[in-house]
Image (cartoon, helix red, strand yellow):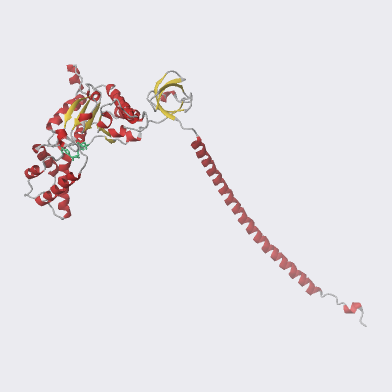
Amino acid sequence: MASDSDSIQPPDDDSSVHKVGSIAERTLSEIERDYVDLREQAQQLLSEKLDLENKVAKQKQKVKRLEEDVRLMRMPPHVIGNIQDVLDDERAVVRSSNGTVFLVTYNRGIDAEIMKPGARVALNQDTLSIIDVLHDAWDPLVMGAEMFEKPLTTFDHLGGLDEQISLIKESIELPLISPEAFLDFGIEPPAGVILVGPPGCGKTMLAKAVANSTDCTFIRLVASELAQKYIGEGGRMVRELFDLARERSPSIVFIDEIDAIGAKRLDSATSGDREVQRTLMQLLSELDGFDSLADVKFIAATNRPDILDEALLRPGRFDRIIEIPIPNDEARASILNIHMDKMPITKGVSVDNLVQGTDGFSGAELKALTVEAGMCAIREKRKKATKSDFNNALKSVVKKRAEKRGEAPNSLWS
Ligand code: ATP
């Protein structure tokens, strides 16, 4: 019988050690692998954390910006006004944008240097205290007024207006160039002239040509833009227009279609009419405040002189009326010559014949005729405009004239 000791074989030392060793090795390498994995994961998580922290910081910034935007949007609006007078280091007289004048206090933190009469300011809505002094800015409509440092149009570009040119020269050019001549005689030149005549006969060109000959800034505004919806708006724009003219002087202010605000005042007026009348009153008072020898001149234009308010035409205002009529035969020849000057034409084209066929045409229509003839020649790839180009152009302009509606009757100008 085999003893227990016989049956139980002593472990084979080598193999068990080997087994334990290989288990330990495997576990160690697994642990090492796990460790490497975990380290990688930790690294990845760390960079993800950094990334997220970055994103959170960015979002926080965005939230801050949005909160600031919301705060600004929730802020009550400020009223805009202009300083009229600074009384002491606490109080000033301001005119708010609707024209009412107030005595208000102002923020002492504002630099006294910039607290000057005329400065644009933001006023607290409730107390009208001055909160801030704003940069000078003109109303976009006033700023949008067509403006040229010195327009390129000269008197040579105008045909058939010799008499009108000499009238405008003595009323506008002479006082600008030699004011002393008027001082010597103790007389005052007109503050402004009014050009009357049908559309397209050279009123704007004439005003531009004076600005050119006197090296003036030319500011052009259509009066209907001054007729505003809100009370006081039109008056404010007139003030700004005059301020702009003063700042850019020497300047010529050309107000086209003056009848839009300068029509006769009626008793039975609607509130809209009354606002237009207030704008006119502002224009008149600004004109009165101007020295007629100052280097700002006013030229207005209208094709409805019959409806103008007498007050506009009083001495010291637009007290000179210059009529720019529909060009006669001679004037038409001269306008056609100006516009055909640089156009290559064949011998058959006769200006005299064109003059005969264009009775009643305005300067703008004569220009349109020459442009159309030139276009015909270009279309046909010819080097020169021919008689038939002009005949076709004439037909097309006559047709367009016939299609026009709502123009002032020609009898108005005869
Ligand atoms: P509106 O009353 O419609 O403003 P306007 O009288 O001011 O018209 P302008 O703008 O001066 O007319 O003229 C329009 C165009 O017609 C000019 O650009 C010019 O080409 C031409 N024109 C008008 N009159 C003359 C003229 N006398 N000589 C040369 N060109 C002229």
Residue 255: percent from left, percent from top = 25, 32
Does residue 200 appear in this view? Answer: yes
Q: Left or right: 207 with respect to 32?
A: left
* Residue that lies at the very extreme toward the front in this rendered image: 268
Q: Quadrant for residue 177, please give it.
A: top left
The residue positioned 92% from the left and 79% from the top of the image is 3
Is the C terminus in the top left, top right, bottom left or bottom right quadrant?
top left
Residue 194: percent from left, percent from top = 21, 29
Q: Quadrant for residue 192, please give it.
A: top left
Look at the picture and state if 27 lies above or below 315. Answer: below
The residue positioned 16% from the left and 42% from the top of the image is 365
The residue positioned 69% from the left and 65% from the top of the image is 30
The residue positioned 67% from the left and 63% from the top of the image is 33
Q: Quadrant for residue 361, please give it.
A: top left
Which sits in the foreground, 270 or 330?
270
Residue 271: percent from left, percent from top = 35, 29
Image quadrant of ligand 1? top left
Residue 73: percent from left, percent from top = 49, 37
Which sits in the foreground, 319 or 15?
319
- Total numbered badges shown on the rendered structure: 0
Q: Left or right: 112 with respect to 318?
A: right
Does residue 217 appear in this view? Answer: no
Is the N terminus in the top left, top right, bottom left or bottom right quadrant?
bottom right
